[in-house]
Amino acid sequence: MNSFRSLYIFLTFIFGLGMSAYSQNQSDSQWKSIFNGKDLGNWDTYLRQAEGTSQKPFGLNNDPLKVFTVSEGAIHVSGQLWGGVSTKDEYENYHLRFKVKWGEKKWYPMPDDTIKRDAGLLYHATGPYDFAYGCWLRSSELQIQEGEIGDFFGVGAGSAEFSLQKKNVRGKSLDQYSLDAPLHRNADAVGGGRVYRSGDFELSHGQWNTCELITRGADAVYIVNGFVVNRLFNTYRPGIHQQTTRGKIQFQSEGAEVFYKNMELRPVNFNRKNAPYLVADQSTLKNINPDKPQVLKITNSGDDVELVAVEIIGAFNDQFVINLPSFPFKIAKGKSFTLPVSVKAGTIANTIVKLRLETVLGPVPDFEVILESR
């Protein structure tokens, strides 16, 4: 309940914000590419010195080792040096989506196979270019790491509020996002304030993952392959007494080969007549098993609405398998759609989670379906 109250307050604040150069016309919600698939003409690169050396940083738009290149319509990041490739323009109040997959190469200091490949999306990014670790803009991060896409890290843009519960990770008690948990403000520390995603919805190595970021003023939502995995409110920088609401978009090079493509965004359209009203034919799906999916029918009983994701809330939420539509998914008033639901083999019996639906302006109110494994 606190999450929704905060969302209402911050969305009210957003209406008074000035629009960025990109999103001046809020009635225009068409997707626009921020990468042409051919070259880096609309991007800047920044690289620090070679790892383990005391050389001078390579700096701005100086990439003699070709860390950032374009290959088959994607930005190919070799990972050989730490740095970033960033948009020249700044953005605010937007819905960003892109595809990412891992390559094979690893570089110092992570050649060991036990170390996960690492990268990241930095947003609301502002100068200087060498603010964090000598190579990244001041920003917030949507973590892109093998098996951990969707975690949050602070990179100096300020602290934020999350619905937090405790998670045991490798013997340590750490923060994890869960929609039903109480709101807490995380630490404002570069490389710190980590908030784990709610579950692992990443595809296997070598496959393209679809990642999405929705920013609404000082709030943000992280989506991985159609599932909401993190949500934050009221990012605030106490040093300048301001909320963090806009900036460049930067993709990291962090010691691992990675590819990014289909990078596009659209402005968030705040013009909505009424709150969405969707109804499920069942309030609870029980005895869900791996062999035969159960089918949930959902009907739109309100105005036409666009859905952008689903959210599964609860421990072991990533053990549930849902055959999702292709998001964003528009459903007209009076129309219905179905979601086949199963679980992965080996799922603990009587695991209970909750299913919610997500729009670009937040969760569909008063919609919740209980899912229970057999």
Image: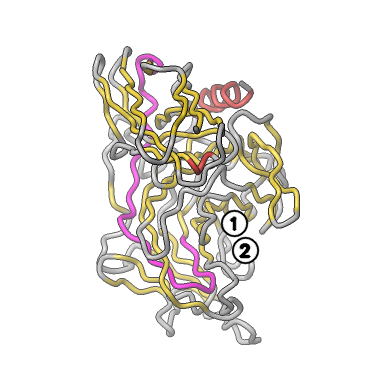
Q: Count the marks.
A: 2
Residue 206 horizontal/vertical position (percent): 38, 65
Labelled disc at residue 185:
none
Residue 160 horizontal/vertical position (percent): 64, 40
Image vertical order of residue 337 relative to residue 126, above or below? above
Residue type, label 1: Arg
Number of residues whose C-alpha sits closer than 10 Å to that of mark 1, classed few (under 14), some (14–19) or many (20 or more): many
User: What's the residue at 69%, 50% (across, down)?
Assistant: 193
Residue 52 horizontal/vertical position (percent): 64, 84
- Residues 265 and 18: in front is 265
Question: Mark 1 vs mark 2: which is more N-terminal?
Answer: 2
Image vertical order of residue 367 relative to residue 103, above or below? above
Left or right, 127 with respect to 226, comes to right
- Residues 27 and 278: in front is 278
Left or right, 325 with respect to 362, comes to left
Quarter occupied by residue 71: bottom left
- Residue tagged by mark 2? 131
User: What's the residue at 32%, 22% (across, down)?
Assistant: 297
- Residues 314 and 29: in front is 314
Residue 96 horizontal/vertical position (percent): 39, 46
- Secondary structure state at the residue bearing disc 1: strand
Image vertical order of residue 69 relative to residue 175, above or below? below
Q: Are marks 1 and 2 in contact (CB under 8 Å)?
A: yes
Labelled disc at residue 138:
1
Q: Is residue 197 magenta?
A: no
- Magenta residues span 251-278
- Secondary structure state at the residue bearing disc 2: loop
